[in-house]
Image (cartoon, grey):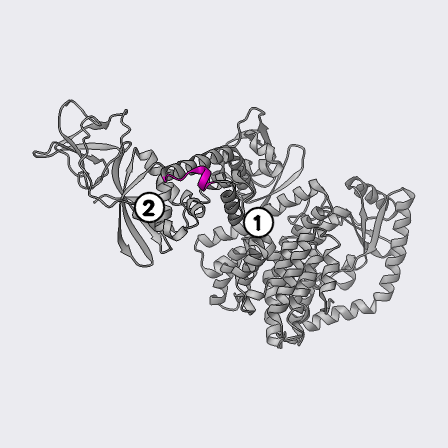
């Protein structure tokens, strides 16, 4: 069993330097340690050790699975916000947004008491699972955090020990299994059993100890024999005895197996260089040692759901003892031990293609957590939700095949689009159709277990359709489609941003040479942490930053300028507009027409004319409640297609209370060619409602402006007003 260890920073530095070589990354890890050390100074754990030992132990656990530098930093800092006066803002300022995101994620999880003891606590599980979806590294830190806590569980009361062990076994170990992190999962299971059923645990330990000497000698002889066999056939290999975990032995005994029936108490693991050598080694072993029928499993051609690959066979070995032998490559062994975290090992050791594959699998596994969010949105009862997570979501995968027989794992509900992007990004981007089981299917076809899918591609394809984002099930496919359009639109955003900024400078009569020279540009780029001028233009064009915000930075008088921009919105009464030639009345050439003030239609709206008494024809939107039930005195009218004049219409904007919201609203209007004529605040509480009269050339322009408003985080609802 694992024991907790007292570490120093030098131990951590030595461990991370084995695979992290970038000086800036190593410096940030040291900075994180020093920050955590100062924050926790004087605090003790219930075990009596200085508190800093906990984050240091968590970081050390993560180095064993080659965690990246941001994850190590977050591990060191993960308790600072929860247990000290530190804030997330300080963490972000000192260590960057990625580390802050991870620390915040772990803090959120740690603030929730997750258990299945009662309904109120079960309800909180929902929040936990949703919290886990932000970044898979949050989950990995949480697993390492729980592992160290389990190693020091002896310091708590027996009641707390059993409660924590039950939580670990029911909630965290299935997640570790789902992510394939065997290295952590196995120890968590053994430690949980130790505290939940100590009699059973120590009974198994005692029986293992009684036979240990005999087993060790037998394994050593078998190991030597198999190694000589492989050497005779020039197969470079590494071979070692493998210990069966106590929890897995308990599981088998619990299912009714006798001690002597547990074949893999005696076990070997053989590591070779290539997949081909796995099968050659298997053939050699079977030629010398008789295999047991039905005990052979090929997880290389058909990997497990958590990416695990290996050949398993049970043979009659030396002196008639049964041996379970696992054969796999070194790369497969990394995946078997680290699962979803194995991509770190690949990346740091320089393998480019494996790293990319691991990243793709990592993205795929995130879909598991997004499935859980979708379940939450279905408003299931608390117990139903937890049961669904345990019984369905953890198993909600299908296995389909390429025409060559390669197995692809996808979430339930996946489509040919998800399959194509899982195979390769370019296959998805060039896809023009799909064939499933020799039949052409639509792209929204829901794939089933054992489907054989062929993707038809074309070199002349212009790329995916934006509608595919709504059809795809996996975040991997959705993100790749979005990435395609992001790259395609980038130049357009840059040009748009440059044009908008220059136009705004000109409108404000600010000389570009005086107000937007190299010195000013450099200051703005540094303040916004942007790489170059092109990135600044892109940020404006893509609405990451409003042009008004950039102008304020140029002038370096943000608050004053915000007030100036809002003050320039003119509050005035609507003027009568001559629209005689803008509205064409069926069968009548010369008649007075006017726009109805109740619904204020603009070009592009479906309109109808109402013959008033003495005031000509009043033009209404067809859905205006003032004329919708009127059958008489209506006349067909239509917009003159040649008009470009702007007409007033009124919208209501529901917004959260934030500082200077009108500046962003006005800037969005300017960016979309819409003029704001009047703004009234009609309601003000937790949500502020603005009644805004705007001038727009047509409905398409207005709709674009309204859609753009929804990109502002504080905007809750925007709608056209009919009085």
Residue at image x 49%, y 57%? 385
Residue at image x 74%, y 55%? 17
Q: Pick the residue in front: 120 or 553.
A: 553
| Element type at mark 1 | helix
Residue at image x 18%, y 24%? 586
State whether residue 354 is above or below residue 38: above
Q: Earlier in the sequence, mark 1 or mark 2?
A: 1
Q: Position of residue 270 (x, y in %)?
A: 81, 50
Q: CA distance from mark 1 to mark 2?
A: 33 Å
One can see residue 295 in this view: yes
| Element type at mark 2 | strand
Q: Position of residue 251 (x, y in %)?
A: 69, 62
Q: Pick the residue in front: 283 or 49.
A: 49
Q: Position of residue 363 (x, y in %)?
A: 59, 46
Quadrant in which the N terminus is drawn: bottom right
The residue labelled by disc 1 is 366
Quadrant in which the C terminus is drawn: top left
Residue at far front of view = 514
Please give the range of residues in magenta.
508-516
The nearer-to-camera label among 1 and 2 is 2
Q: Position of residue 488 (x, y in %)?
A: 52, 33
Q: Which mark is residue 718?
A: 2
- Membership of 15 in magenta stretch: no
């Amino acid at each position: 069993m694992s024991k907790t260890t007292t570490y120093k920073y030098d131990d951590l530095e030595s461990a991370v330097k084995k695979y992290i070589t970038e000086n800036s990354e190593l410096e940030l890890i040291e900075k994180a340690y020093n920050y955590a050390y100062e924050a926790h100074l004087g605090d003790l754990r219930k075990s009596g050790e200085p508190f800093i030992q906990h984050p240091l132990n968590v970081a050390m656990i993560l180095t064993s699975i080659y965690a990246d530098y941001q994850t190590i930093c977050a591990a060191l800092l993960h308790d600072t916000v929860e247990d000290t006066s530190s804030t997330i803002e300080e963490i972000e300022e000192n260590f960057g947004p990625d580390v802050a995101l991870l620390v915040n994620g772990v803090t959120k999880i740690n603030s929730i008491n997750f258990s299945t003891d009662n309904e109120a606590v079960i309800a909180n599980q929902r929040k936990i699972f949703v919290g886990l979806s932000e970044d898979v590294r949050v989950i990995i830190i949480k697993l390492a955090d729980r592992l160290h806590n389990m190693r020091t569980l002896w310091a708590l009361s027996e009641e707390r020990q059993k409660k924590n062990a039950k939580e670990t076994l029911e909630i965290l170990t299935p997640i570790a299994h789902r992510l394939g992190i065997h290295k952590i999962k196995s120890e968590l299971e053994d430690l949980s059993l130790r505290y939940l059923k100590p009699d059973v645990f120590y009974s198994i330990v005692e029986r293992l100890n009684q036979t240990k000497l005999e087993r060790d000698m037998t394994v050593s002889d078998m190991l030597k024999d198999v190694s000589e066999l492989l050497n005779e056939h020039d197969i470079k290999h590494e071979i070692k005895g493998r210990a069966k975990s106590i929890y897995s032995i308990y599981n088998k005994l619990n299912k009714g197996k006798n001690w002597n029936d547990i074949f893999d108490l005696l076990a070997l693991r053989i590591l070779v260089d290539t997949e081909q050598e796995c099968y050659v080694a298997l053939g050699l072993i079977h030629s010398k040692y008789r295999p047991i029928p039905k005990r052979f499993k090929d997880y290389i051609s058909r990997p497990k759901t958590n990416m695990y690959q290996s050949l398993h066979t049970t043979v009659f070995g030396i002196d008639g003892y049964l041996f379970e032998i696992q054969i796999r490559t070194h790369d497969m062994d990394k995946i078997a031990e680290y699962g979803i975290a194995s991509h770190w090992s690949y990346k740091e050791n320089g393998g480019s293609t494996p790293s990319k594959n691991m990243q793709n699998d990592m993205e795929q596994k995130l879909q598991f957590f997004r499935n859980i969010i979708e379940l939450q949105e279905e408003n299931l009862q608390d117990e139903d939700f937890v049961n669904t997570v345990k019984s369905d979501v953890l198993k909600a995968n299908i296995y389909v095949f390429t025409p060559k027989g390669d197995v692809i794992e996808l979430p339930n509900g996946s489509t040919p689009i998800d399959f194509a992007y899982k195979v390769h990004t370019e296959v998805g981007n060039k896809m023009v159709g799909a064939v499933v089981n020799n039949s052409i299917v639509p792209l929204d076809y829901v794939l089933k277990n054992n489907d054989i899918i062929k993707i038809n591609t074309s070199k002349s394809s212009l790329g995916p359709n934006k509608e595919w984002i709504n059809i795809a099930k996996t975040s991997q496919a959705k993100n790749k489609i979005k990435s395609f359009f992001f790259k395609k639109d980038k130049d357009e955003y840059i040009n748009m941003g440059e044009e908008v900024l220059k136009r705004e400078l000109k409108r404000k009569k600010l000389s570009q040479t005086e107000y937007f020279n190299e010195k000013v540009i450099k200051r703005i780029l540094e303040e916004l942490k942007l790489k170059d001028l092109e990135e600044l233009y892109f940020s404006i064009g893509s609405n990451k930053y409003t042009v008004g915000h950039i102008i304020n930075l140029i002038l370096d008088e943000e608050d004053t300028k915000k007030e100036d921009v809002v003050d320039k919105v003119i509050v005035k009464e609507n003027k009568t507009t001559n629209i005689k030639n803008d509205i064409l009345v069926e069968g009548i050439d010369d008649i007075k027409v006017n726009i109805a003030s109740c619904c204020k239609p603009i070009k592009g709206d479906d309109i109808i004319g109402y013959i008033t008494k003495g005031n000509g024809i009043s033009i209404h939107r067809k859905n205006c409640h003032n004329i919708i039930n009127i059958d008489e005195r209506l006349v067909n009218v239509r917009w003159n297609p040649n008009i470009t004049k702007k007409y007033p219409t009124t919208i209501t904007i529901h917004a959260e209370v934030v500082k200077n919201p009108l500046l962003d609203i006005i800037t969005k209007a300017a960016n979309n060619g819409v003029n704001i004529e009047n703004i009234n605040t009609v309601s003000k509480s937790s949500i502020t409602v603005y009644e805004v009269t705007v001038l727009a050339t047509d409905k398409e322009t207005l709709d674009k402006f309204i859609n753009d408003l929804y990109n502002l985080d504080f905007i809750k609802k925007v709608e056209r007003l009919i009085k």
